[in-house]
Every structure is written in C-alpha cells, then in structure tokens.
C-alpha cells in the first residue's frame, strides 16, 4: 500500500482533520467486490439516489442503517426457499452482501423503496441556517477584537 502525507492540504484549511481518515479508509477498502452492482445518481443540487440491484431479495431480506454519517445496506436471504427445488442452473446471485457509503455533512436518508428488483434510496442535503454562507459586514469605525 502506498502511503502519502496529507500535511500540505491541511496547511491552508481549518476543520478538515477527518479527511485524512477518509482517505486512509478509502485506500484500505477492498476494491475486488462489486456485488451487488449499484448506481449513485444526482437529481438536482441537493437530491441524490443510490440504486442497488437487489434481484431475488424482498424487504425482509434487506436492512438499512445510518450511524455516524455512514449508510450501511446489508442483505441476505433469511429463509430457505422450497427444499424440494433442485437447481439445474442458478445464475441469480442471492448471497449476503454489505455496502457502506459515507455521507457528507447534512445529508439525510429520506426514503427507501424496493421495486422491480431495485432498491432505491433517496438522499437529500438539508443545510441548517447556521451552516449557510453569511455576509460579514466590515465596520471601519470599530477596532477588531484583540485576542
């Protein structure tokens, strides 16, 4: 694994300490697993959707959880289908999976729906008033606070 220093990026930024952790976790993340396939879509400035191909799964087989800004999608068959079935060819994968997505600040999961074998998870960015940009007036008459 290649290691590199993030120090030059932090010299001109304030409060972005966790980016180093994000890059390290991205480097450690296994890139070999691509099951199940998924899309990440942007629908406007503040609306996003994650679409996971969940063929063969029903709502009871899937679990969504958000903890500390990480959305985790887990799936696995809970019950055995008919025991009398002998598969001559079983090409529909129904193995267990776990996908994790780190959500940016102020991103909330609004809705999740399973339709036609696709799990659609709608996300929206809700920026509170205190986090929105604000104009700072410059007063020539008042001295700046000394610290």
Image (cartoon, grey):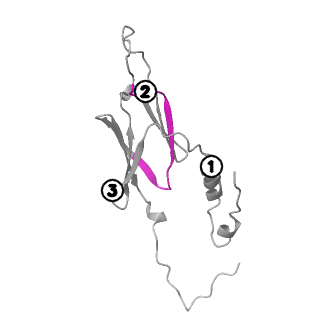
Instruction: Measuring from the top left, give residue 132's x and y in whole percent.
Output: 45, 67
Above or below, 83 relative to 128 = above
- 101 inside magenta stretch: yes
Q: Nearer the viewer, mark 1 or mark 2?
A: 2
Give the CA distance from mark 2 to mark 3.
Answer: 29 Å
Do labels 2 and 3 touch, CB within 8 Å? Answer: no
Q: Name the residue under label 2.
A: 94
What residue appears at the point 52 percent right and 86 percent down from the top-left corner? 138
| Mark found first going from the N terminus, 1 or 2 | 1
Give SS at disc 3: loop
What residue appears at the point 53 percent right and 39 percent down from the top-left corner? 33
Above or below, 30 relative to 58 = below
Instruction: Measuring from the top left, give residue 123's x and y in whole percent.
Output: 39, 49
Q: Name the residue under label 1.
A: 25
Give the CA distance from mark 1 to mark 3.
Answer: 27 Å
Instruction: Measuring from the top left, give residue 5's x and y in whole percent.
Output: 71, 62
Range of residues picked out in magenta: 91-109
């Amino acid at each position: 694994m290649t290691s590199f220093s993030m120090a030059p990026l932090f010299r001109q930024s304030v409060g972005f300490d966790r980016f180093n952790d994000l890059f390290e976790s991205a480097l450690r993340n296994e890139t070999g697993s691509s099951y199940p396939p998924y899309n990440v879509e942007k629908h406007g400035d503040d609306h996003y959707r994650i679409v996971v191909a969940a063929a063969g799964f029903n709502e009871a087989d899937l679990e969504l959880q958000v903890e500390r800004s990480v959305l985790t999608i887990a799936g696995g068959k809970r019950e055995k289908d008919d025991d009398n079935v002998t598969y001559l060819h079983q090409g529909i994968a129904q193995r267990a999976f776990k996908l994790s997505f780190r959500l940016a600040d102020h991103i909330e999961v609004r809705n999740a729906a399973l339709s036609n074998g696709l799990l659609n998870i709608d996300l929206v960015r809700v920026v509170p008033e205190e986090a929105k940009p604000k104009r700072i007036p410059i007063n020539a008459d008042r001295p700046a606070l000394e610290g």
